[in-house]
Image (cartoon, rainbow, N blue to C red):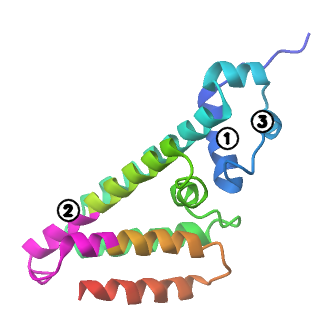
């Protein structure tokens, strides 16, 4: 008798994240999810209730994956180098991804945030977290004398978040790493 594979919720969440990241919420049907996850509807509904809950949990899982990067950047001695490295890592990740998926959270923002309240809330929480992180680094740079004290830290943090998000959208085009680096170079002049 063939052995039946047990349903692994963590593995299913990881695979669902990959599929939603690549195709978006509206681009994925339940039949495709069942097939891609290698399970059945019963297991899927028992673990995640419905497609929307699975999507939101996949989005939360994606956000948790970035925590280590922010910890690494926060630990750096030079806050402006940390900001630069954030953008460098984004470019590197985008160009190492042959599917050019961009950022799952940015994708969720452009696809659903204006029409789905819970996704809107998740993406706003992400924006607040990243902006807060940038404010922290910029404040440290001002305290270190690396950034002019007359600079509006809150405005610069919002600008850098917008630049980062835009970079994750344009990665879907056929821009080269050099072209993306030029965009970042121009954008980071705000720190001069």
State the SS at label 1: helix
Q: Nearer the viewer, residue 2 or 88?
A: 88
Residue holding disc 1: 15
Quadrant for the C terminus, please: bottom left
State whether residue 54 appears in this view: yes
Judged left or right of residue 22, residue 110 is left
Q: Is residue 156 magenta?
A: yes
What residue appears at the point 15 percent right and 68 percent down from the top-left corner?
Answer: 139
Closer to the chain start, of discs 1 and 2, is 1
* Mark 2 neighbour class, 10 Å CA radius: few under 14, some 14 to 19, many 20 or more: some
Write down the quadrant of residue 132 in the picture.
Answer: bottom left
Give the answer, above or below, for where 135 lies relative to 145. above
Per the rendered image, the range of residues in magenta is 134-158
* Mark 3 neighbour class, 10 Å CA radius: few under 14, some 14 to 19, many 20 or more: few
Position of residue 101 measured from the top left corner of the image (x, y, whole percent): 64, 62
State whether residue 78 appears in this view: no
Give the answer, above or below, for where 147 lies relative to 85. below
Residue holding disc 2: 136
Give the answer, above or below, for where 175 lies relative to 111. below
Judged left or right of residue 69, residue 138 is left
Closer to the chain start, of discs 2 and 3, is 3
Residue furthest to the top: 1
Tags 3 and 1 touching, CB below 8 Å: no
Write down the quadrant of residue 52 in the picture.
Answer: top right
Residue holding disc 3: 30
Q: Is residue 86 magenta?
A: no
Write down the quadrant of residue 184 in the picture.
Answer: bottom left
Quadrant for the N terminus, please: top right
Residue 147, numbered label: none
Position of residue 133 measured from the top left corner of the image (x, y, whole percent): 27, 59
């Amino acid at each position: 008798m063939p052995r039946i594979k047990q349903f692994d919720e963590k593995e299913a969440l990881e695979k669902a994240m990959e599929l939603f990241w690549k195709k978006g919420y509206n681009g994925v049907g339940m039949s495709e999810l069942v097939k891609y996850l290698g399970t059945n509807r019963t297991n899927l509904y028992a673990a995640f209730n419905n497609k929307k809950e699975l999507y939101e949990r996949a989005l939360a899982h994606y956000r948790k994956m970035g925590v280590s990067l922010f910890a690494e950047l926060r630990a750096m001695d030079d806050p402006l180098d940390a900001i630069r490295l954030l953008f460098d890592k984004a470019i590197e990740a985008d160009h190492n991804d042959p599917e050019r998926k961009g950022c799952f959270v940015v994708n969720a923002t452009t696809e659903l945030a204006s029409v789905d309240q819970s996704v809107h809330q998740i993406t706003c929480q992400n924006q607040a977290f990243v902006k807060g992180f940038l404010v922290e680094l910029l404040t440290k740079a001002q305290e270190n004398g690396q950034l002019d004290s007359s600079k509006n830290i809150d405005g610069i943090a919002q600008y850098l978040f917008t630049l980062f998000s835009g970079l994750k959208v344009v990665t879907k085009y056929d821009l080269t790493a050099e072209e993306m680096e030029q965009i970042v170079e121009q954008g980071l002049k705000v720190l001069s």
